[in-house]
Image (spheres, helix red, strand yellow):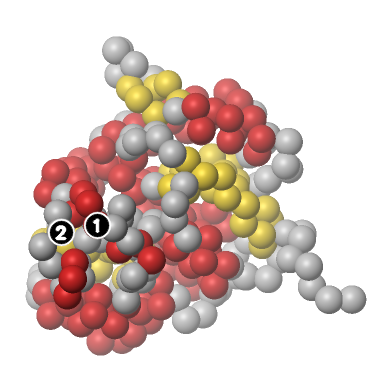
Amino acid sequence: MNNDNWGDRARIGMFIVSSEAVPEAEWQAMAPKGVSVHAARVTAAAPWAEWRADRNSVDLADDIARGCQQFASMELEAVVIGHTSSSVIGGKGWDEAVIAEMRTILGDTVHVTTNGADTIAGLMAVGAQRPFIVAPPWFGDAAIQSARTYYGDYGFKPAGAMRYAPGGKWRDIPPADLYARGMGFAQRIKPLYQQIIDNCPAEADAVFIAGTGFRCVGIIEALEGALGRPVVTANQASLWRCLRLSGVYDAVESYGRLLQTPFMRS
């Protein structure tokens, strides 16, 4: 009989932007045998859960609440909010608040996490303190500043930040308009690799590539070899943490140091 990718070791649910193909593609490329990935698509604006007036709890976007109800019956090991922007715009404490609210629907038997929490854990696991933040071209200045503030609030001291410049016909299009114009499906990783090599500060002790819709896992290993520093990416970090939360400790080759370590910090 042939493999049917049933997910007999772990089934993981993830919420992703409705129009993106990158998260599923990258997870499927990296996931070890016996792990299946199940996506729910979200049309809400970031963050995908709004703070209530007391700023101690959140209201889930309709797509998230409905997706949690559907995921609850699927015998999943873990569920993740696969959206860097929601975490960094939501700010410190948002991840914990949204996880608590999702658990009211999913119950206590499913591990719940967010991309923000995953990337923080991943950066800690590789020993990063001064990461170089690389943002996708559709992140505006405010989003990049939110990312710097967010990771700074969790104890990191970013060595710098850059937004990938796609060039060509995209050069004069504002970041906020790039995705609607088709940039999400016109991504190239070779120019991204070169821009990171050219711009990574000497004082950076790691590279962090933000954005689950930002195609990049194909260059992780090459970047680590060229820079001599660990590289953590949004999808890589969430897959790693969901695997560990699910009790899967396989060392995944070819996608960076993080996926080869069993260690995890919450």
Residue ID at (57%, 67%): 28
Give the left or right position of residue 39, taking residue 202 as reference: right
Residue 214, numbered circle = none
Residue ID at (51%, 80%): 253
Q: Is residue 258 above or below residue 87?
A: below
User: Quadrant location of residue 178?
Assistant: bottom left
Local crowd size for mark 1, using a 10 Å CA cut-off: few (<14), some (14–19), many (≥20)? some
Q: Residue furthest right?
A: 1
Q: Is residue 53 above or below residue 133?
A: above
Q: Position of residue 150 (x, y in %)?
A: 22, 43
Quadrant for the N terminus, please.
Answer: bottom right
Residue ID at (22%, 61%): 137
Q: Residue furthest top?
A: 53
Q: Is residue 142 above or below residue 128?
A: above
The kind of residue tagged 1 is Leu
Q: Position of residue 108 (x, y in %)?
A: 63, 31
Residue 36 visible in the picture: yes
Give the left or right position of residue 37, taking residue 173 as reference: right
Q: CA distance from mark 1 to mark 2?
A: 6 Å
Q: Position of residue 100 (x, y in %)?
A: 49, 27
The kind of residue tagged 2 is Ile
- The answer to the question of whether label 1 and label 2 lie on touching residues, with beta carbons closer than 8 A, is yes
Q: Position of residue 22 (x, y in %)?
A: 45, 63
User: Quadrant location of residue 196?
Assistant: bottom left
Residue 228 visible in the picture: no
Give the left or right position of residue 26, taking residue 247 as reference: left
Which residue carries the number 1 mark?
178
Local crowd size for mark 2, using a 10 Å CA cut-off: few (<14), some (14–19), many (≥20)? few
Residue 173, numbered circle = 2
Q: Secondary structure at mark 1?
A: helix
Q: Secondary structure at mark 2?
A: loop
Q: Work out whether mark 1 precedes mark 2 in sequence or the reverse, and give the earlier one.
A: 2
